[in-house]
Image: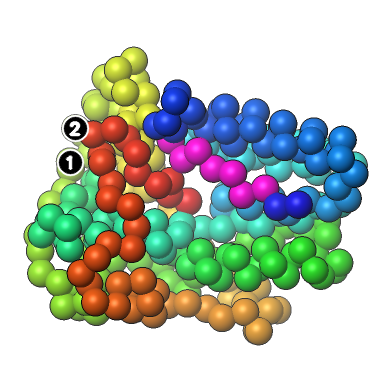
Amino acid sequence: MINAVQAGFGATLGSSPKTVDGQGSSNLLAAAKANGVHHLVLVSIYDVAPGHPLELWRMKHRAEEELKASGLAWTIIRSTAFMEWGVGFVCQPLITQGKARVYGRGDNPINFVSAHDIAQFVELAVVDPALRGQMVTVTGPENLSFNQLAETFKTVTGTAGVVTHVPLPLMRLMAKLLVPLKPALAREIQAGVFLDTADRTADGTALRARFPSIPVTTLPEMIRRDYPAAKEPAWPVIDRSLGAAPPPR
C-alpha cells in the first residue's frame, strides 16, 4: 500500500494538515492493518520534525512515527520540494496573467526534485524488499531560488512577464491576522516565510550513486516536458485568495 495523501495547507471543506496528513494517515494505517496489508510506503517530506514551525511537516513526522511503530513492514520516501509545484506556483501565472508573485525576496536556494523521479522511487520501494525498513531521502539536482525558477522558465519557454515580490514583514503580519479568517491562506503565507528564510538546500549525490537507474530530472527538462508550447497551463490555476496553492516541500 502507498500513502501519498497530502492536504497541503487545507482549503477544501475545512481540511487541514492535521485532519488529512495526521488523522487521515492514522485512519489509513488502521485500515491497512485491519485488511492484512504487510508493507506500506509513505511519501513524506524532507526534514520533518515534531517541533517544526509548519503544521504539515509536524503531521508528516507523526505519520512516519506511527508507521514505524505499527508492526508493518515500511518504507518512507522523503522528498524535497517538487519542481512541478514550484513552477506551477511561481511561473505558471507568467503564462496565464503575464505576471507572477513571489512570497518574500525569492533569493533563498531551495532543492527541487521532479515528482516523476519521486514516483520511480516509490515504485522501486514497492517491489524491492531491500528498501523495507528504510528511510530514503530523494533530492533534485540543484538548489535554486524562486527567482531562478522564474528566469529559467522564461528562458526555456520564451515567456515574458514581470515577477513581483511580497515583502517579508507584510507576510509575517498577514500570517497572523488571517488565522481566524482564512486559516489555509495563513498557513500558505507562513510557509512562504519559511521557504524564504530557512535553509532548504540538500545534496543527493550519494543516493543517486546508489540508484543510477533512476533518472535525475533537471528543471529545464521538466519545463520542456510539462510546458511544450507554453500556451496552456500544466498545473491547475492557483487562486491565492482561497489559499488553494499546492503544498511546498
Q: Looking at the picture, which amino acid does disc 1 mark?
A: Pro
Q: Nearer the viewer, residue 95 or 101?
A: 95
Residue 26 visible at all? yes
Give me the residue at 33% from left, 29% from top: 186
Q: Secondary structure at mark 1?
A: loop
Give me the residue at 38% from left, 40% from top: 191
Residue 50 visible at all? no
Q: How far across and down, in percent of the image, does residue 61 sit? A: 64, 39
Q: Secondary structure at mark 2?
A: helix
Q: How far across and down, in percent of the image, does residue 5 sit? A: 59, 44
Give me the residue at 18% from left, 42% from top: 166
**Magenta includes 64?**
no
Whether residue 235 is situated above or below residue 156 in the rendered picture? above
The residue under label 1 is 167
Give me the residue at 25% from left, 39% from top: 240
Left or right, residue 174 beside residue 97:
right
Q: Which mark is residue 89?
A: none
Left or right, residue 78 beside residue 177:
right
Q: Nearer the viewer, residue 9 or 54?
A: 9
Whether residue 88 is situated above or below residue 67 in the rendered picture? below
Q: Looking at the picture, which amino acid does disc 2 mark?
A: Leu
Q: Nearer the viewer, residue 17 or 206?
A: 17
Mark 2–mark 1 contact, CB under 8 Å?
yes
Whether residue 248 is situated above or below residue 122 in the rendered picture? above
State which region is magenta: 3-9
- The residue sitting at the top extreme is 180
Left or right, residue 86 beside residue 154:
right
The residue under label 2 is 170
Q: Residues within 10 Å of mark 2 (few under 14, many from 20)?
A: few
